[in-house]
Image (cartoon, helix red, strand yellow):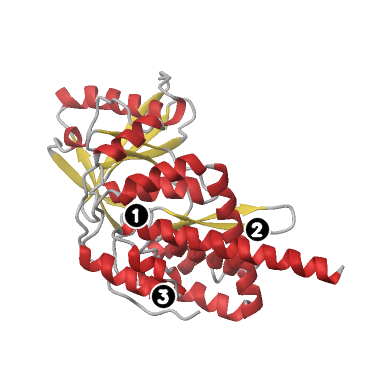
Amino acid sequence: MTATNDTISRKKPIYPISQPLRKFLKHYGREVKINAVYSDMLRYNGGIPLYDVHGKDTLWLTVLYPQSEATQLHLALLEVYALLKTGGELTDHLSVQRIDFCTFGNSNPFRVRIVNNYNDNFDYFYVKQADASRIYGLELEHILSPNRISYLVCDTTLIEEHIAGIPGDMFIKNQLSEKGFNEIRLAKEFVKFNERCFLRLLGDMRSYNYVVDVTPDFEETHYRIRAIDFDQQSYEGRKKIYMPQFFKENLAIVNLCIKHINAETLHQYQLEEQTLMARRIKSAKHMIHDLLNCMMHDTISDESRVSQLRQELYEHYNNPVFLNCKNMGALVRASLREMIKRNSQHFKKMAAKRVKDY
């Protein structure tokens, strides 16, 4: 493992939702009717810069709405939150405390803070412009990773739940030097995260595009790295873009992997993740088939990037099947099929060896 930097498109275009993808979303309960859509959120008439607890500008803007619109908008947002969390059951003890707007990034999201008036506990969700490539990324994460993803779509609006965890850049800055920090467990999780991203072609996993979920156990602490940005699902042409190990922002964790993981252990962790992904595909075979079928008939990148990634994956796997892939959806399917084939061959080989040894 070595860490380098690679270039990524500064502004990826937003791809519209195709009719096949819309049909998929309706069939699997992701498409809903809501009363607060992205265009409604844009009608704010002022804003205040949002600072963190240390007084640093977060680059988010807390937006303000005319009183005549704020009451109706807040009620509609509470209804959206209820759909996202409880299937639509609205309770009286929740209220909208704050709405923030992000001026950077592809989707220019609004972040809505919901507070429980009884105990001041709060939660967030996001209102974004619907982007087909991001939706594919969310759905692939839901199916192929150990994490379940809750999101909804209404026309050109995307609603996403908040994914809790310590932002990767903050974790690297503050937690890596803590006493008692388990370097080996984090290194193992990063290897598995790296493998997962590459096999399903999720790009741009620099440290600020994922969070680290820390779970104390009775003897040790467990770490899970979770992607939070899916804009770069199968868009760029360079193979390295889909491998978090090659971003300089992740260098500190990459160095832990080099320190604690040898070639045999690296292969073991990769095989573990491949096996889990293969099992998830088997358990959701109809859903993944329907999703990839939509993806293979959709446009979520341009021909030059598809051509470059097609060639690089062919050279990586030494498998001419990649040369027949016409778009990013076909490349994702070919990548997952290659993973399943190699995983199956490995276990057949191990089974034959056990029989021979017996």
Q: CA distance from mark 3 to mark 2?
A: 26 Å
Image quadrant where one finds the C terminus = bottom right
Asked if 125 appears above or below 147 in the picture, the reply is above
Element assignment for label 1 = helix
Badge 3 amino acid:
Phe
| Left or right, residue 50 beside residue 346 | left
Residue 162 in sight:
no
Badge 1 amino acid:
Gly
Badge 2 amino acid:
Thr
- The residue under the point 32% across, 33% down is 23
Image marks 3 and 2: residues in contact by CB distance under 8 Å = no
* Nearer-N-terminus badge (3/2): 2
Element assignment for label 3 = helix
| Label 1 neighbour load within 10 Å: few <14, some 14-19, many 20+ | many
From the top left corner, tell me how far across and down residue 239 is, in percent: 37, 71
| Label 3 neighbour load within 10 Å: few <14, some 14-19, many 20+ | many
- The residue under the point 21% across, 27% down is 70
Q: Which residue bears the numbered disc 3?
A: 246
For marks 1 and 3, give the one nearer the viewer: 1
Residue 213 in sight:
yes
The quarter of the picture where residue 126 lies is top left
For marks 1 and 2, give the one nearer the viewer: 1
Q: Which residue bears the numbered disc 2?
A: 221
| Label 2 neighbour load within 10 Å: few <14, some 14-19, many 20+ | some
Residue 329 is tagged as: 1
- The residue under the point 20% across, 61% down is 11
Residue 356 is tagged as: none
Q: CA distance from mark 1 to mark 3?
A: 23 Å
| Left or right, residue 329 beside residue 277 | left
From the top left corner, tell me how far across and down residue 194 is, in percent: 49, 66
Residue 20 vs residue 249, the one in the foreground: 20
* Nearer-N-terminus badge (1/3): 3
